[in-house]
Image (spheres, grey):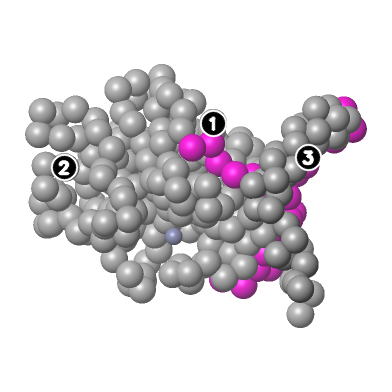
């Protein structure tokens, strides 16, 4: 007779719930008393060969931003370095003043412990973040791009030469404002931006915007051709010093 057959699944579940409640009641307050809210993260290696300890899961949404997918968030695909989380939050907070009617969507970041993050080539040590392009609808109102499993969480969206996809049009001044705020916040946090990957065709439009000169002079845009088209999202690698990997 196997051990499993002795366990009634129903009572097992109830037992699990009881244990969880006990943990919540008794363990959590003690743990909270001795542990800080969150430790600073420690990254190792590089964005293409690395890992992270004590990463942070980005909030699913805030007043002017949302994750591309609550499912992907729950699966653990939106973890970052604590410094990166701080910079992202500060930039969104600034955008509430500078662009109060805009709404922003962030995409994939990385696993809780980093490492290989398919289908991305980087995103391995908590320093890479994808952001979906800010868009307006036909009425000129800021909206979020449709991101669901049907279109590979938004990554399958293809913009045409006029920066349009269905009823959506890219707002370059909002995009430029976001990059400007990210760079400013990153510098303030004592880190910086190591690389921005975005469709090269967008650069003249970004450089023609209000913060164009600043972006051209301060933000390191990828010069070469990326391995996938970055038209629906822009990829940002933040510059945080990391420990070397063991191997
Ligand atoms: Zn990316």
Q: Earlier in the sequence, mark 2 or mark 3?
A: 3
Residue 49 highlighted magenta (yes or no): yes
- The quarter of the rendering in which ligand 1 is drawn is bottom left
Residue at x 37%, y 41% (from the top left corner): 105
Q: Quadrant of residue 200?
A: bottom left
* Position in image of residue 8 (x %, y %): 69, 53
Q: Is mark 3 within 8 Å of ligand 1?
A: no
Name the image quarter holding the N terminus: bottom right
What x and y, as percent, mark residue 72?
46, 51
Asked if residue 12 is positioned above or below residue 210 in the image, the reply reads: below
Q: Position of residue 220 (x, y in %)?
A: 45, 56
Badge 2 vs badge 1, beta-carbon distance below 8 Å: no
Magenta stretch? 32-60
Pointer 2 local density, CA inside 10 Å: few below 14, some 14–19, many at least 20? many
The mark nearer the N terminus, 3 or 1, is: 3
Q: Closer to the camera, 222 or 78?
A: 78
Q: In the depicted view, which residue is nearer to us: 137 or 225?
A: 137
Answer yes or no: disc 2 within 8 Å of ligand 1.
no
Mark drawn on residue 168: 2
Q: Which residue is mark 3?
A: 19
Query: How would you rate the neighbour count of disc 1 (Cα within 10 Å): few for under 14, some for 14-19, many for 20 or more?
Result: some
The residue labelled by disc 1 is 90
Q: Going by the picture, which residue comes out furthest to the bottom?
A: 247
Q: Identify the residue at horizontal 54%, vertical 31% (top origin).
A: 90
- Identify the residue at image location x=9%, y=34%: 138
């Amino acid at each position: 007779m196997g051990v499993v057959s002795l366990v009634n699944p129903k009572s097992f579940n109830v037992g699990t719930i009881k244990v969880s409640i006990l943990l919540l009641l008794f363990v959590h307050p003690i743990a909270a008393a001795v542990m800080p809210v969150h430790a600073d993260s420690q990254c190792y290696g590089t964005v293409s060969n690395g890992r992270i300890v004590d990463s942070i899961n980005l909030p699913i949404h805030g007043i002017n931003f949302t994750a591309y997918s609550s499912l992907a968030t729950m699966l653990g695909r939106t973890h970052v370095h604590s410094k990166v989380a701080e910079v992202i939050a500060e930039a969104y907070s600034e955008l509430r003043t500078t662009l109060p009617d805009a709404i922003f969507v962030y995409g994939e970041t990385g696993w809780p412990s980093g490492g290989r993050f398919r289908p991305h080539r980087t995103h391995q040590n908590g320093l890479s973040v994808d952001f979906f392009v800010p868009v307006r609808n036909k009425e000129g109102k800021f909206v979020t791009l449709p991101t669901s499993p049907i279109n590979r969480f938004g990554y399958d969206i293809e913009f045409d030469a006029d920066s349009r996809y269905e009823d959506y049009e890219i707002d370059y001044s909002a995009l430029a404002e976001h990059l400007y705020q990210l760079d400013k916040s990153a510098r303030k946090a004592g880190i910086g931006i190591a690389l921005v990957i975005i469709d090269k065709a967008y650069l003249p439009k970004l450089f023609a915007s209000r913060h164009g000169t600043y972006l051209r002079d301060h933000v390191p845009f990828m010069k070469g051709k990326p391995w996938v088209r970055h038209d629906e999202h822009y990829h940002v690698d933040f510059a945080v010093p990391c420990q070397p990997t063991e191997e």
